[in-house]
Amino acid sequence: MNIVAVVSLRGLPAEAEYGLASTFYYLFAALFFLAPVGLVAAELATGWPEEGGMFRWVGEAFGSRWGFLAISMVFIEGCIWFPTILTFAAVTLAYTGDAAAAPQVSSDNVFVLAVVLGVFWLATLIALRGVKSFSQVAKWGGIVGTLVPAALLIGLAAAYLASGNPSQVELSWGAFVPDLSKFSNIVLAAGIFLFYAGMEMNAVHVRSIRNPVRNYPIAILVAALGAVVVLVLGTLAIAVVIPTGQIDLTQSLLTAFNTLLAWAGIGWAGPVLAAMLAVGVLAGVVTWVAGPATGLLSVARAGYLPRWFHRTNRAGMPSRILLVQAAVVTVLSVMFVILPSVQAAYQLLSQLTVILYLVAYVLMFAAVIALRYSQPGRPRRYRVPGGVVGVWVIGGCGLLAATLALVVSFVPPAQVEVGSPTTYVGLLVGLSVVFVALPFWAYAARRASWRDETLDFAPFTWQVADQEPAPETRAAQAAPPEAPS
């Protein structure tokens, strides 16, 4: 489950830019980010298993205002992520037709916008039909559109090299360790942290594991190794056949596939494979359309959003939240027409996605450390090993890595044409400020009447004890009740 949650093929070209050095970045991010996310989320999920997820964990440590910010970042990040992943879908659909015309078609802004909006609204309609509908699409689409193509890409690249064909990847120690003195070289690599995002979602299942103290760390290790192997080999497979200077963030995966398929004498399979990848994108989008929206519904009904957002349809889906989400995605997608190229828009929205998700992760890592002090006696079926020192080392590594990645995400990458650097940075900073400020504004505007009295939403531990977790939450305690006493 963890491997499927974090592995995606659409971002591989971004790291193929680095050749063999991409392996260094994958290993670094797995050690200092992926593993800490899994271990920290396991402690938080077993210590505070009540409804709310990241909202619950961060809220226990720093108050409901910061918990609302964390869950909002996950939801908003998802809205911004959709246009980036659907750009990949547009490219793959372009390759199902005339291969010679595909690069030109996939670079057409109007074509990309039409596909992004068409596929996203289709995914929204499927999600509105309920769990049975979108779970089947997610299940079979994930197998057909992600796992099978990944295995094929890696297998073809291995056979290509075994047959004596030249590799575009330099194999040397110097190529493996990047030149970290050049700050611009690590900007694109910051996006690799989002490759590993999502493992915290499965931490809730720790309660169902036999001997979680022993078995869960092993599961995290196996999942981390599996994800790293797929991502490293998939990235190198692209770098093997495409020279670094010719790698395109939105087209190179299909280009690599077409090159390898033609070498294997089965070039006719290119359009079929492109269609499979598009199905995989739809499967992933359907899952993420429904998941965060459903989580936000619980928080909304607990009194943090107006009752207008509480509406569900006959299938039990949060229809109005899903429609607001679709409207936001539609507006953001128009950026593909405004910016000078599809690649520039792709890079801008990808970096914005990274920034917002990392804000949530910074809060989560800080929360696990703070809760060891504020609630040391709280029963936790799983604890980050090593006591207080261990939680500082593991949680601190994740906190430091997420913070550094957050900072460098604002710097324009030297490897990608983004138009005017000033415009790029200005848009990135402006959009980040707006999306981070929105949850604070919504929190300040909340009313006691927003709470759904029929909802059994457990209060925070500090609310039951009539005390606050941190000075920052004094204003929150003076506000209208947010949970039953």
Image: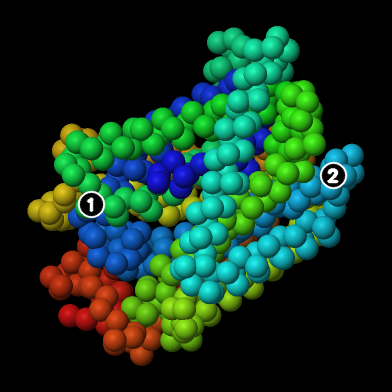
User: Does label 2 or label 1 sit earlier along the sequence?
Assistant: 2
Query: Residue 245: x percent and y percent?
Result: 77, 27
Q: How is the image coloured?
A: rainbow
Q: Quadrant of residue 480?
A: bottom left
Q: Is residue 345 left or right of residue 353?
A: right
Residue at the disc numbered 1: 208
| Residue 417 vertical placement versus 297 (above, below) | above
Please, what is the three-letter code of the amino acid marked with disc 1? Ser
Label 2 Cα crowd, 10 Å radius (few <14 / some 14-19 / many 20+):
some
Quadrant of the image for the C terminus?
bottom left
What residue type is disc 2 on? Ala
Q: Residue at x 26, y 40 (%)?
A: 216
The answer to whether 179 appears left or right of 415 in the picture is: left
Q: Name the residue beneath numbered marker 2.
A: 102
- Relative vertical location of residue 312 with respect to residue 182 in this rendering, above or below: below
Secondary structure of the residue carrying tag 1 is helix
Circle 2: element type:
helix
Image position, residue 102 (x, y; %): 85, 44
Tell me where residue 83 appears, x and y as whole percent: 66, 57
Q: Could you tell me how far apart the alpha carbons at marks 2 and 1 are, in whole angstroms? A: 48 Å
Please indicate, yes or no, whether residue 421 appears anywhere in the rendered image: no
| Other-residue count near label 1 (Cα within 10 Å), few / some / many at <14 / 14–19 / ≥20 | few
Residue at the image point whose x is 55% and y is 10% from the top = 173
Decide which of 448, 146 is in the foreground and name it.
146
Q: Splitting the image into 4 quarters, where does residue 235 fall?
A: top right
Residue nearer the viewer, 126 or 338: 126
> Residue 171's image quarter?
top right
